[in-house]
Image: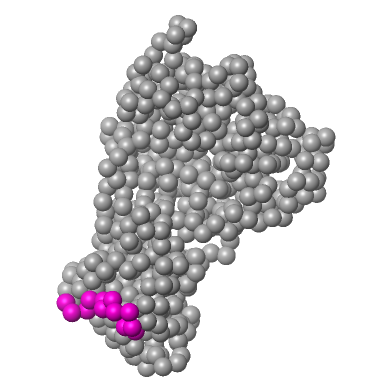
Amino acid sequence: MHLSELLAEVRPHVEANFRSPGGDWPACTLFFSVSDGTSRARVRHASASDFASAWLAGTEKLEQLVQRRGMQVRWLRIDWVEEVRETTMKAWSEELAKTKRNYYRYGVALDRGLKIAFLEQELNGNAMLYGGNEVAHATVNLHNFNVYAANRYGAGTELDPGRDRAVYVLSTRGVFRDALEARTHLLYGPGRNAGRRVRDRLTDQDVFELIERGALYLASQVQESGKFHYGWHPCFDRPINAYNSLRHASTTYAMIEAWEVTRDETLKQAIDRSLSYLTTKLIAQAELPDGRRGAFLVDGSEVKLGGNAVCLLALSKYAQVTGTDRHHALMAALAEGVLFMQDPATGRFVHVLNYPDLSVKEPFRIIYYDGEAAFGLMRLYGLTREPRWLEAVVRAFDYFLSAEHWKAHDHWLSYCVNELTTYRPQAKYFEFGIKNFADYLDFVRDRITTFPTLLELMMAAETMLQRLVMYPEMRPLLNAVDLDAFYEALERRAHYLQNGHFWPEYAMYFRNPARIVGSFFIRHHAFRVRIDDVEHYLSGLVAYLRYLQAGGRVRALRLQAAA
């Protein structure tokens, strides 16, 4: 579609939602952002005393830009200024210092006429307010700010950092259109949802599409060898030069969960490549002291308890959804490796071994490993019904209970106790599962970061609660749960995960949007996209989709009635 046609179709949506900032400011300021889908958005803006004049001036600038660059416009976004607030550089810097890193959601202008102005997405996409991971709050990065300002407006538009210099904070709202789609999306204004498409509720189809896009992104990161591109810093399209075998395995597990939903062949082929790399390059066999054959996921010179666990998760899930038994012997060996790391008397796990001598390196590293190990053994037990695996989990939970592991609010423990109560529906396990979330609901509901593992925690807990009410003698345990607060927190967290999705209307402001669109990011880590970040979004959304398909809020009402 030609740009002029696209603009003609989008204009009515802008006019219908436009609101002037009023006051002593230009009555209408419009920002026009365009991208071909493969390069960072180019932005032009115009101010005038009325909408029609601003539209004409802005679209003329845009047409000249597109013609000069020979650009084929794929994405068009138009924003307008709804409010302007004058402040000083000193006061603005203090405001930034009170804002979490990368969470500043306003634009800024350097002059009263708004002639030198930047959208929030330009500021964040170019790391103009990012001081590095060692700085927890937003702050002006003078170098990045001036590089982009010069690129956008020409030399001589650098930011004067003088304390008394006036700056103008902009509240904006906008619309977005993909030239390959028929729908124009209204975008949220300032706030935690700023800059993404408005959605009042998530339908089954909405969640399916989020899963599909995230899973296909991961599939695109699996190389022919089966090894992943580990991750990207998208502001400047820089690769993350590291690798982690545990995250390779756990990401593959999430991809298999997603494939069970989408049945996409491209995704399946990527899964097979990833599993081949996992089983032939990353897992090593070893003879244990008692003569049994074990297997271990090797990460450099280490063996991590959680590594073996997530291998079990990936391979058992693959066996479940495909019906294959070709990894059964390897899974048994991996489980032997987990048992090798467990004290049979106390049930406690050792977390990290040296490789290849398998001596103890660290008795404890992170609580995640305990939950992962127990969950992996439970999934293998569900597949094979080998009593040894369940017995090991029961021993582990004796330790978890005595150590009060529920205080960690760990999503892996939530997964595991949900599985354990399937086969051992005992009050102590249900109570553990409830304590793991009951005093955590405010955090789940209100946490400013997307924190996707919180949704995983809640979805596993919801499944466990649905099982609990099947046992009348267990129902008094629900007295410890505020079910209204529980479901409000669950729904709020599921919807909030959309703020970590690289929608095209946000991805277009980063250096290589084609690389990241459809993925999920961690905002406070400079919008980092790493395979395990995407993994946790996917697992939570897959569980949420199943919840919606099983009745969603109707399930909540049934649970409350039963309680």
Quadrant (top left/top right/bottom left/bottom right) for the N terminus: bottom left
254 above or below 349? below
Span highlighted in magenta in the image: 155-166
208 above or below 413? below
Residue 144 position within the rendered picture, expressed as x and y whole percent measured from the top left: 25, 66
Is any part of residue 148 visible from this angle?
A: no
Residue toward you, 339 or 378: 339
Residue toward you, 183 or 516: 516
Is any part of residue 334 visible from this angle?
A: yes
Residue 340 position within the rendered picture, expressed as x and y whole percent measured from the top left: 49, 17
Residue 305 in the magenta stretch? The answer is no
Residue toward you, 89 or 190: 89
> How would you classify the magenta stretch by its main secondary structure?
loop
Say which quarter of the image contains residue 14: bottom left
* Residue at 68% across, 36% down: 432
* Residue at 50% across, 49% down: 452
405 above or below 448? above
Residue 23 position within the rendered picture, expressed as x and y whole percent measured from the top left: 45, 92
* Residue at 71% across, 48% down: 555
509 above or below 241? below
Q: According to the image, what is the colour scheme of the structure?
A: one colour
Left or right? Give the position of 355 relative to 15.
Answer: left
Left or right? Give the position of 456 relative to 68.
Answer: right
* Residue at 18% across, 77% down: 154
Residue 228 position within the rendered picture, expressed as x and y whole percent measured from the top left: 32, 38
